[in-house]
Image: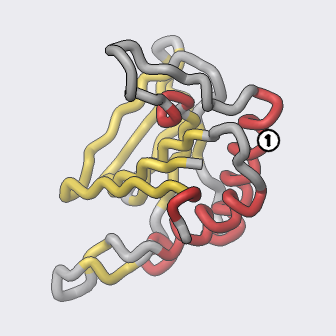
Amino acid sequence: MRLVIQRVGKASVEIAGELYSSIGRGLLILVGVAEGDTPADVEWLAAKTAAMRIFPDENGVMNRSLIDIAGEALAVSQFTLTASTRKGNRPSYIHAAGHDVAVPLYEMYCARLSALLGREVARGVFGADMQVSLVNDGPVTIIIDSRLRE
């Protein structure tokens, strides 16, 4: 699994011109699920997301986690994070997990992160055409790939 985590002042998802979900200060998390990803990847990434120290402390040093600041989270599925761009100019998504694998792992990630944060994680709609808006705070953007944890 691959995540793109953005520290935000606020973020939202619109579907068909209607607001679907929104958050204030916290993290916008784009979630890409690849073939071969497992619940172990979900556990590791959820724990990493909740505990990552990318929010400023009283001295302006990135020393606080999403848990520490009681921040919000918005998780949006994004299969394009699995793109291979090695050949040609058209990305290949051959390594993206199919719906039968990706949907349960995305839902599991959201549920596990919710449990760790003690609050519901806002979501997009898997497979929907979404318009995602954000105010990137910093900007701070982190990429985490569960296959690179060892």
Name which quarter of the figure residue 103 lies in: top right
Q: Residue furthest bottom?
A: 59
> Residue at point 74% right, 63% down?
40
Q: Position of residue 142 (x, y in %)?
A: 35, 57
Position of 22 relative to 65 (above/below): above
The quadrant of the image that shows the C terminus is bottom right
Q: Is residue 2 left or right of residue 120?
A: left
Q: Position of residue 59 (x, y in %)?
A: 17, 87
Name which quarter of the figure residue 93 lies in: top right
> Residue at point 76% right, 53% down?
38
> Residue at point 79% right, 36% down?
101
Q: Residue furthest front?
A: 87
Q: How crowded is the residue under tag 1: few (<14 C-alpha within 10 Å), some, or many (20+)? A: few
Secondary structure under the numbered disc 1 in the rendered image: helix
- Counting every numbered tag in the picture gives 1
Q: Position of residue 148 (x, y in %)?
A: 51, 61
Identify residue type, mark 1. Pro
Q: Position of residue 24 (x, y in %)?
A: 40, 53
Question: Of residues 90 and 56, which is closer to you in this image?
Answer: 90
Position of 19 relative to 34 (above/below): above
Position of 47 relative to 99 (above/below): below
Colour scheme:
secondary structure
Position of 135 relative to 139 (above/below): above
Name which quarter of the figure residue 52 lies in: bottom left
Question: Of residues 51 and 149, which is closer to you in this image?
Answer: 149
Mark 1, residue position: 104
> Residue at point 60% right, 71% down?
47
Q: Is residue 46 left or right of residue 105?
A: left
